[in-house]
Amino acid sequence: MDVKMLLHGGKNAALAVLAILALSGAAFADSKINVTLWDKGPDSAQPDATHPLGMGSGGDMAMAMLGVKADVTSVPAGKVTFEVTNASKDIVHEMILSPAPADGKLMPYMADMAKVDEDGAGHLGEVSELNPGQGGALTLDLKPGKYVLFCNIPMHFMNGMWTEITVN
C-alpha cells in the first residue's frame, strides 16, 4: 500500500491497515490451556487391575475416579502455557506433558511402580506435585502433533488421570 495514499487516503484506508495488522497479530498470539486435576475423594486412587483406565487400555472412562480436564483440546503451534489447578480436597496431583504415542501404541507403563516411564514417554515438562487447592504453570514452545497431559503419582494414570490435546 502506498504510504501517501494511507496518509492522505482517509480514515477507511487507515482502518483497513489496522484491521490487517490486528488479524495477523492474532495468528501469532500465545495460547493458554486451563488444566484441572480432579478426583472423587481420598480413596480415588485404589488399584483396580480389572478395569484399567490408562490411555489406550480400553476402559470405560465414565468409571474414572480421577481425571485431567483441559478447557480446550486444540491450540495452534507455538508458545503454549498450561495453567494447572489441583481441584482435589485430599490428594496431591501433578501434570506431565509428553507426546502422544503413535496410534495403536500404549504409554510405556511400569506396572511394578504403578506409573508411566516418563523418560520412555518423552517427558517434555511438568507442574510438579501440587497439594490440594494449589496451582502452577508450565510454558513450552510446541510443534504440531498430539500430546498427553497426565498425572504420574502412582496409580493415578491407570485410574484415568490423563487427557489428550492437539497442537495444529
Image: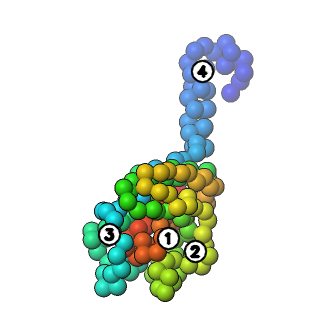
**Amino acid bearing label 1:** Asn
Q: Give whichever of 7, 43 is nearer the camera.
A: 43
Is tag 1's residue or tag 3's residue first in the polypeptide sequence?
A: 3
Q: Give whichever of 22, 119 is nearer the camera.
A: 119
- At which x and y percent is residue 143? 61, 60
Residue that mark 4 sits on: 13
Residue that mark 2 sits on: 118
The Cα–Cα distance between marks 2 and 3, rounded to whole angstroms, is 25 Å
* Label 4 environment density (alpha carbons within 10 Å; few <14, some 14–19, many ≥20): some
**Viewer-side label of 1, 3:** 3
Q: Which mark is residue 7?
A: none
- Furthest-right residue in this view: 3
Q: Does 119 appear above or below 67? A: below
Residue that mark 3 sits on: 43
Residue 26 seen in this snapshot: yes
Evaluate if marks 2 and 1 touch, with contact meaning CB atoms under 8 Å apart. yes
**Viewer-side label of 4, 1:** 1
* Label 3 environment density (alpha carbons within 10 Å; few <14, some 14–19, many ≥20): few
Is tag 4's residue or tag 2's residue first in the polypeptide sequence?
A: 4
Evaluate if marks 4 and 2 touch, with contact meaning CB atoms under 8 Å apart. no
